[in-house]
Image: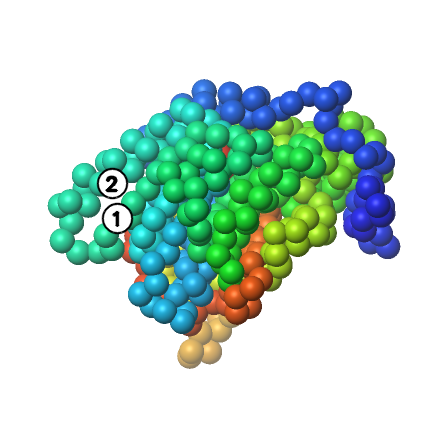
């Protein structure tokens, strides 16, 4: 995709194009719809989540965030292991990442979200963590935190901080940034909130749908909708030839947790807009590529198992996938392994079990990408993977607003 003025025009690869300058459906403001959806979403207990069709997929997304956050915190501490770290968690929801911040050893956290009910639940979760931490003799101490109910796409958060001069080392926005692309003004305010109070050298990290992948799947579909029994994406406009830079709406449904409008994020435009706040893109990877790279590390692979991010196959228990094609990839992989000769040259091996995800879950997961921006003015650093990092078990609740594998041996 290429940006031509206020339009996205089709490139040689034919990925996407734009037909209009505008964005919203007749000027409709959909932020209230999103807030209402998450305010009304019932909080599920751990046992209920374990029975969910998307249990392993949500754990996989949680693993992706854990690795992204951990790697970035390691980079921030590279020159000073005792550095006090201040974090802004944009669109923080019900507090799905609170435990990650504790395990990351940060010193101060600000959480902001549009859904007031979610903010209340997040603050209650933090208070529970505070009580538990008083009885903990070991492990990282709990950070200080403040919680703000605000529309991060329309309100300037600096007016709401306890300390309006507060500066951050890291801003995180997980599975939510795309809501800001309802309009140019909203996208700019979201970027201002994410980046204007970052210290030089600070990072803005996040996860968001990959607009190229969404458009690719749309054009490969028979109509204006695609998906499976786990997720479904529906574009209201049957015209697939072009999309507006802002307000390119589609409806996203994720089994049991998400059913609301979202917006395409044209990433070259986001990069250009971020320059206004002295931000430079230093990493952008699809979830598939991110997984393939990070799973090579022993600490990341260990965490993947601890978090139950992959489903054991074959298993005596009931598999989450019900479609006949959901585990063909895993079955074929096992057949290949079992056909290989062992150390003695025998062609038969003991039955093999692997970690995998159903095909339907993997299709939903690979809609997303990871991004890392860094604020210029400090020393520019690439967020590379450490050789290894010790992780504790991740047991926090996966945030319902986190939307969204291939087999792993």
Q: Secondary structure at mark 1?
A: loop
Asked if residue 14 is positioned above or below residue 180 in the image, the reply reads below
- Residue in front for this viewpoint, 350 or 372: 372
Q: Position of residue 60 (x, y in %)?
A: 46, 48
Residue 314 higher or lower than 83, as above or below: above
Q: Which mark is residue 129?
A: 2
Is disc 1 surrounded by few (<14), some (14 to 19) or many (20+) residues within 10 Å? many
Neighbor class of circle 2 (other Cα within 10 Å; few <14, some 14-19, many 20+) is some
Q: How many marks?
A: 2
Q: In the drawing, does residue 371 fall left or right of residue 401?
A: right
Give the residue at x 72% y 22%: 27
x, y (%) of residue 112? 44, 36
Q: For residue 296, say whether it is visible.
A: no
Q: Left of 224 or right of it: where is 197? A: left
Q: Percent x, y for residue 356? A: 48, 51
Which residue is found at the position 74% from the left and 31% from the top?
23
Note whether residue 371 is visible.
yes
| Residue 142 image label | 1
Q: Are marks 1 and 2 in contact (CB under 8 Å)?
A: yes
How far apart are the two marked residues, 1 and 2, measured between alpha carbons?
8 Å
């Amino acid at each position: 995709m290429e940006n031509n003025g206020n339009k996205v025009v089709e490139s040689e690869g034919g990925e996407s194009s734009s037909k209009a300058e505008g964005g919203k459906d007749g000027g409709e403001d959909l932020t209230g719809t999103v807030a209402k959806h998450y305010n009304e979403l019932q909080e599920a207990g751990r046992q209920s989540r374990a029975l969910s069709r998307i249990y392993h997929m949500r754990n996989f997304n949680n693993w992706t965030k854990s690795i992204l956050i951990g790697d970035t915190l390691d980079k921030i501490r590279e020159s000073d292991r005792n550095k006090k770290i201040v974090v802004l968690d944009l669109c923080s929801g019900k507090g799905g990442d609170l435990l990650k911040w504790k395990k990351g050893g940060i010193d101060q956290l600000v959480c902001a979200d549009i859904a007031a009910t979610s903010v209340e639940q997040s603050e209650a979760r933090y208070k529970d963590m505070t009580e538990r931490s008083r009885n903990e003799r070991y492990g990282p101490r709990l950070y200080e935190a403040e919680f703000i109910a605000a529309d991060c796409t329309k309100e300037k958060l600096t007016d709401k901080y306890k300390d309006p001069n507060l500066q951050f080392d890291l801003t995180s926005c997980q599975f939510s940034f795309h809501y800001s692309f309802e309009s140019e003004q909203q996208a700019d305010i979201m970027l201002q909130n994410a980046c204007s109070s970052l210290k030089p050298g600070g990072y803005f990290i996040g996860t968001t749908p990959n607009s190229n992948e969404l458009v690719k799947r749309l054009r490969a579909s028979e109509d204006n909708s695609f998906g499976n029994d786990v997720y479904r994406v529906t574009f209201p406009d049957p015209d697939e030839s072009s999309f507006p830079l802002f307000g390119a709406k589609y409806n996203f449904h994720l089994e049991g947790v998400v059913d609301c409008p979202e917006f395409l994020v044209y990433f070259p435009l986001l990069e250009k807009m971020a320059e206004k706040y002295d931000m430079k893109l230093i990493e952008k990877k699809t979830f598939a590529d991110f997984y393939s790279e990070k799973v090579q590390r022993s600490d990341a692979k260990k965490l993947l198992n601890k978090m139950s991010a992959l489903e054991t196959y074959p298993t005596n228990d009931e598999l989450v996938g019900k479609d006949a094609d959901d585990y063909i990839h895993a079955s074929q992989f096992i057949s290949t392994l079992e056909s290989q000769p062992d150390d003695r040259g025998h062609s038969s091996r003991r039955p093999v079990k692997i970690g995998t995800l159903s095909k339907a879950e993997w299709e939903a997961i690979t809609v997303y990408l990871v991004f890392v921006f860094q604020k210029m003015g400090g020393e520019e650093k690439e967020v590379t993977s450490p050789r290894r990092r010790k992780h504790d078990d991740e047991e926090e609740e996966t945030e319902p607003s986190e939307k969204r594998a291939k087999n792993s041996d």
